[in-house]
Image (tube, helix red, strand yellow):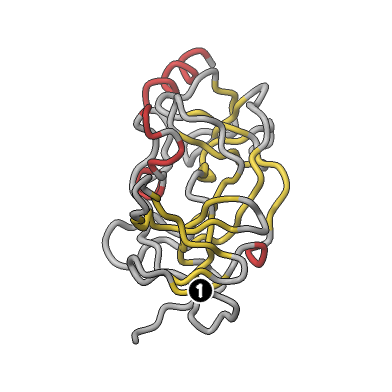
Amino acid sequence: MNDERSSEREKGPRFGRALAAWMVVTVCASAGCGSKGSTPIGPDPSVGGGSTNTQGGATSGTRLRARFFVGEDGSKQEIGGWHDKQLDIDCAFQAAADGTYRCLPPEHATVSADFFSDAGCTQPMAGVRPGCAPPTYAWALDGDETCGPAPRVTAVFKVGATPAKMFSKDSQNPCHEVIAVAGVALYTIASAVPLTTFVAAKAQVE
């Protein structure tokens, strides 16, 4: 068992390329947490009640509001992304498994297929880079390809607490406890959050 625990520390998590590709800088930029997310595409123009902004062509809707730097001299520059008034979160559009783009919080953990919070290895955990502030949400993705289509978000969860114990399994080893995992901070997964909680959009060409 000690040998297994030691080897787990060395090999670190197998989150795949999705973790590197989809962690977002805004989790804690000063600590270098995360990496690039997808480029926001803006809300569906058919949504009523919006107001057109002159900078960048962003159009605020009834729920999603464009984000700007506002200079003390009256200047404005679009930041990118949106603020969801209903959820009171910043968000950016990501491809979702329901065939839409959903405005999801970029500060997120990624659900792991390798690490669990129970001895039966049935309750997966979510991870972020060490040093990042604990995120509120975790995403599950349907792939980790760096070539071809980007992974889609299949599910969103609320992030729970730091686990009291951690477990892992793979094709060579049954479910076993691990003491430490290199290169990732792990959290339990709490309740599921329906994708429909987040504003949907479609991509279109004008």
Q: Is residue 31 in view? A: yes
Residue reaching furthest front? 73
Residue reaching furthest top? 2
Q: Quadrant of residue 163?
A: top right
| Point 54% across, 75% down: residue | 50
Q: Can you say whether 181 is above or below 191 in the image?
A: above
> Where residue 127 sits in the image (x, y, percent)?
51, 36
> Where residue 184 sits in the image (x, y, percent)?
45, 30
| Point 65% across, 32% down: residue | 117
Q: For the C terminus, give its image quadrant.
A: bottom left
The residue carrying pointer 1 sits among few (fewer than 14), some (14 to 19) or many (20 or more) residues within 10 Å by Cα, namely: few
Q: Is residue 113 in view? A: no
The amino acid type of the residue labelled 1 equals: Ser
Q: Nearer the viewer, residue 59 or 171?
A: 59
Q: Nearer the viewer, residue 100 or 89?
A: 89
Residue reaching furthest right? 191
Residue reaching furthest left? 147
> Where residue 18 sits in the image (x, y, percent)?
39, 49
Could you say whether the residue bearing mark 1 is in a helix, strand or loop? strand
Q: Can you say whether 45 is above or below 107 in the image?
A: below
| Point 67% across, 42% down: residue | 122
Q: What residue is pinned by disc 1?
A: 51
> Where residue 125 sits in the image (x, y, percent)?
59, 38
Q: Can you say whether 152 is above or below 172 in the image?
A: below
